[in-house]
Amino acid sequence: MSFLSFQTATQALRAVCDSASVLGGIRLGTATPAEWPEQALPAVLSASSAQPGPLREFWRVSQPCIGGHDEGIAWRRAGDLLYGVIELDEADFADASASPLQAAAEAAYRRIFRLLDAQGLPELWRAWNYMAAINSETHGLERYRQFNIGRQNAFDAARGAGCRIPAACALGLVDGPLLIAFMAGKEAIVPVENPRQVSAYRYPEDYGPRSPTFSRAALAYPPGQEVLFISGTASIVGHHTVHVGDVAAQTRESLLNILVVLDEANRIARTGPFRSEALICRAYLRDAVDLPVVDALVREMLGEVEVSYVEADVCRADLLVEIEAMALQAR
């Protein structure tokens, strides 16, 4: 059995862990690249201690990992768990019949599904998606909507209509390649939706030709554990943005949505209820000056949770903040 844990580090990595037991992670800021598959985000605002500086978030397992590189994916696995990272330059898809971002997104997810099938771990649990200029319009369509078309095309081709849709987020950076990190396993997730919101994959065509492909949350089952992944969550009720221009009100609405999703997950959790104060969060802010307001509200509504802050553009131009969360419990 490979027991999974989640850790953060701002100090030297050798003081934190044996790198052979790290499945993969995300690097926030300017830290030196690690030996494991690692998604690099440059725009960190602060670590969970509210101290600025490089931050690592990584998944650690209780046994050594094996890994490799396939079709541009750096990956590691331990038992029935797999973590991977892929980066694709849109310029490499300039000759595609679709927009470069749409083609890159479809190619990335097709490659991910081929890897999971080859490894015998077909269930995609969680995906973290980052792209340049997410709200800009190119090729006659907003770039986030281009990404959604490519992602959904890959799901349709590789998994079909009956697949379990993973938890996910999609954020915009100033520039750079399409960045996708993902976690997968052998046992299927249990998707969780929010009764206050229309499921993202059922959005009307107002939000693009293809709907976003993610569940509001997912319960995943590494051996002996239960993990709750709460997708990037924003100030949306039904399918409409609410509190446009008011970062405090948007943050409260986002946190209320997280608490409702938490309640929905706890109705079916196998290990007993997940507590709000045990959540590990990441908040994405369109404007760095909003950090004190957002941080105060996170702690007021969730408790003294572990939270890191990243400056990034949210998937809708009228959204100012997005918050994701996760928690682990033993079975």
Image (spheres, rainbow, N blue to C red):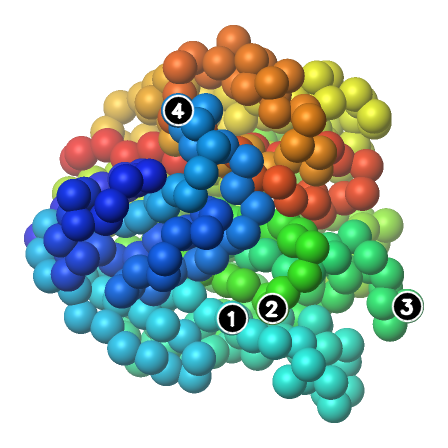
**Residue 263 sits in quarter:** top left
Q: Which residue lies under the disc numbered 3?
A: 140
Q: Which residue lies under the disc numbered 4?
A: 49
Q: CA distance from mark 1 to mark 4?
A: 29 Å
Expressed as whole percent of the image width and height from the top left, the position of residue 178 reads 59, 66
Which of the two labelled residues, at mark 1 and mark 4, occupies the earlier sequence position?
4
Q: Which residue lies under the disc numbered 2?
A: 177
Can residue 193 be spotted in the picture? no
The type of residue carrying mark 4 is Ser
Instruction: Report helix, strand or loop for mark 1.
Output: strand
Q: For this view, does 140 lie left or right of residue 236?
A: right
Q: Which residue lies under the disc numbered 1?
A: 87
Dot 3 surroundings within 10 Å: few (below 14), some, or many (20 or more)?
Answer: few
The C terminus: image quadrant: top left
Q: CA distance from mark 2 to mark 3?
A: 20 Å
Q: Residue at x 56, y 68 (%)?
A: 155
Instruction: Report helix, strand or loop for mark 3.
Output: loop
